[in-house]
């Protein structure tokens, strides 16, 4: 039996926003990371993935529950882990070698061991020849190699990776991912246990032994997928594609989306960050495909990553323009009519659905209809939103609601005056 290196036991994390409201970010999350495992955390943006990694790294304390490394509670930066970030903050005035060496200096590793280990890490990750280069001389891919070398040089028991490939272009990411897989396959590779965050489903299925799917609002574990495939994996093989499909199904499964019997509010049902144009484009594609499209295929056709496609899918399903079943996106009757209608009819369908199904749009519409002169300052809505969202998220919610309401001609927005206005003649 393999033992747990990391145990996360019923961890909950709330952040307090400036207006004093408690924002739940992680709710009752439990997981175990066993010796030698590669586990991927897959979830939409905002599902608390980075927060969970920071808790395990000992950079953030949970509000409730406990995280353990081996048998001890993690209450300070965790020396058993090292982290690779999406964009690695390299010190621009240090060379590659000096950047990689930093972690060993912090640990007090003396010369000549320090140089020897640094050179070994640089060599392993394919940076030899670049020892004396400065970060600004390096491409994005080479910089991220420095990020990996800097994490691996301390030979952590557990490597934590927070979307390490997502800032790289597709080919560079593919290349680096492939090299890491080959490194892991070598038995002398010092770090055997990896927890990686990604929003790229194929990446998770390519690398991990297990995928944990997280859900949003608040972040919690929705399910687990085991991947019993040998490395290197055939990314076009039937098994591989089945698992990709399964992961899409789990991510889009709305059975977990909170209690449907409680009337949704702008805070419990946030608007996905999707423009009407983006949604319209996606629905057109699905309509052209006979009204039903396989999500992995749709993402591939659009060369989209999950973070780009999911808000569009979420928005379309929230509005009632589409439903997801078995990793397919299927247009509803309204969705078909919307995709095929002329612009005025499309706007009317959209307005009706937004008023029924998008709580923030409904709230704005309702408030404006009873306000004097049918106008309100946007600060009124921002104040309300700040009770349930961070400042950034509150502004984003308002921006989306303005975009949707404008398209449906429910209300107008004057950005200079910060005024929302409803056409008194609107139905
Ligand atoms: P993910 O990595 O899955 O996108 P994060 O863990 O970064 O998610 O964030 C989850 C939520 O927690 C987000 O809504 C984010 O705004 C919020 N959040 C993260 N860090 C803080 C913080 N220090 N203070 C307040 N809110 C935060
Ligand atoms: Mg993150």
Image: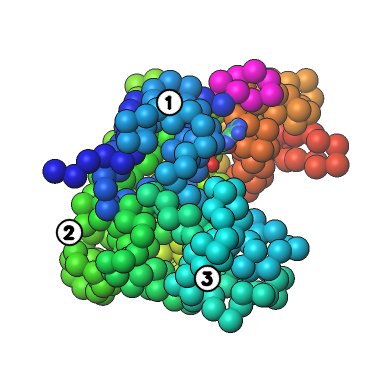
SS of the residue at dot 3?
helix
Label 2 crowd (10 A; few <14 / some 14-19 / many >=20): few
Q: Is residue 170 above or below residue 4?
A: below
Q: Is residue 77 visible?
A: yes
Instruction: Look at the image and tell me whether residue 321 can be seen.
Output: no
> Disc 2 versus disc 3: distance between alpha carbons?
35 Å
Residue at the (51%, 32%) spot, across then down: 76
In this rendering, the label closer to the viewer, 1 or 3: 3
Q: Look at 68% across and 68% down and name the residue there.
A: 95
Residue that numbered label 2 is attached to: 228
Q: How is the image coloured?
A: rainbow
Task: Pick whichever of labels 1 and 3 is earlier in the sequence.
Answer: 1
Badge 1 element: strand
Seen in the picture, residue 373 relative to 166 is either above or below; the reply is: above
Whether the magenta-drawn stretch holds residue 271 is answered as no
Look at the numbered discs 1 and 3 and tell me whether their residues touch, using CB distance below 8 Å: no
Q: Please state if 91 lies on the left or on the right of 345 as rendered.
A: right
Q: Nearer the viewer, residue 220 or 154?
A: 154
Q: Nearer the viewer, mark 2 or mark 3?
A: 3
Q: Quadrant of ligand 1?
A: top right
Residue identifier under label 3: 119
Q: Is 400 placed left or right of 309 in the picture?
A: right
The magenta-colored residue range is: 16-24
Label annotation for residue 12: 1
Q: Which is more N-terminal, label 2 or label 1? A: 1
Task: Report, in whole angstroms, how far the alpha carbon at label 1 lies from the one at label 2.
Answer: 30 Å
Q: Which quarter of the rendering shows the N terminus? A: top left
Q: Secondary structure at mark 2?
A: loop
> Does the residue tagged 1 have its C-beta within 8 Å of any atom of ligand 1?
no
């Amino acid at each position: 039996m393999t033992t747990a290196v990391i145990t996360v036991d019923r961890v909950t994390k709330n952040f307090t926003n400036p207006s004093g409201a408690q924002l739940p970010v992680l709710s009752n999350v439990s997981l175990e990371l066993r010796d030698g495992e590669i586990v991927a955390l897959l979830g939409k943006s905002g599902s608390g993935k980075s927060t969970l990694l920071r808790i395990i790294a000992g950079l953030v304390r949970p509000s409730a529950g406990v995280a353990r490394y081996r048998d001890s509670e993690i209450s300070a930066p965790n020396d058993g882990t090292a982290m690779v970030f999406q964009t690695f903050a390299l010190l621009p005035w240090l060379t590659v070698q000096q950047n990689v060496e930093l972690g060993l200096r912090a640990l007090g590793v003396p010369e000549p061991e320090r140089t020897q280990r640094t050179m070994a890490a640089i060599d392993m990750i394919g940076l030899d020849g670049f020892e004396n280069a400065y970060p600004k001389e390096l491409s994005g891919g080479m910089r991220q190699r420095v990020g990996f070398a800097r994490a691996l040089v301390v030979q952590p028991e557990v490597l934590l990776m927070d979307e390490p490939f997502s800032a790289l272009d597709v080919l560079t990411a593919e290349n680096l991912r492939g090299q890491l897989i080959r490194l892991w396959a070598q038995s002398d590779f010092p770090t055997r246990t990896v927890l990686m965050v990604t929003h790229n489903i194929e990446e998770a299925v390519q690398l991990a032994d297990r995928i944990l799917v997280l859900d949003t609002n608040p972040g919690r574990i929705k399910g687990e997928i085991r991947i019993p495939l040998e490395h290197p994996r055939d990314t076009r093989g039937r098994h591989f594609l089945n698992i990709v499909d399964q992961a899409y199904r789990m991510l889009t499964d709305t059975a977990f989306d909170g209690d449907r019997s409680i009337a949704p509010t702008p805070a419990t049902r946030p608007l996905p960050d999707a423009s009407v144009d983006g949604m319209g484009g996606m629905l057109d594609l699905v309509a052209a495909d006979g009204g039903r499209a396989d999500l992995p295929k749709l993402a591939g056709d659009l060369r989209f990553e999950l973070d780009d496609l999911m808000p569009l899918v979420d928005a379309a399903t929230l509005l009632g323009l589409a439903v997801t079943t078995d990793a397919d996106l299927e247009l509803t009757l309204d969705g078909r009519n919307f995709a095929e209608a002329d612009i005025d009819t499309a706007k009317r369908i959209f307005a009706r659905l937004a008023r029924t199904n998008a709580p923030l749009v409904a709230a704005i519409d309702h408030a404006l209809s009873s306000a004097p002169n049918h106008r309100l300052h946007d600060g009124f809505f921002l104040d309300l939103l700040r009770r349930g969202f961070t400042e950034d998220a509150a502004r984003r919610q308002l921006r989306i609601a303005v975009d949707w309401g404008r398209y449906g001609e429910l209300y107008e927005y004057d950005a200079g005056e910060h005024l929302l206005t409803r056409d008194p003649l609107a139905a």
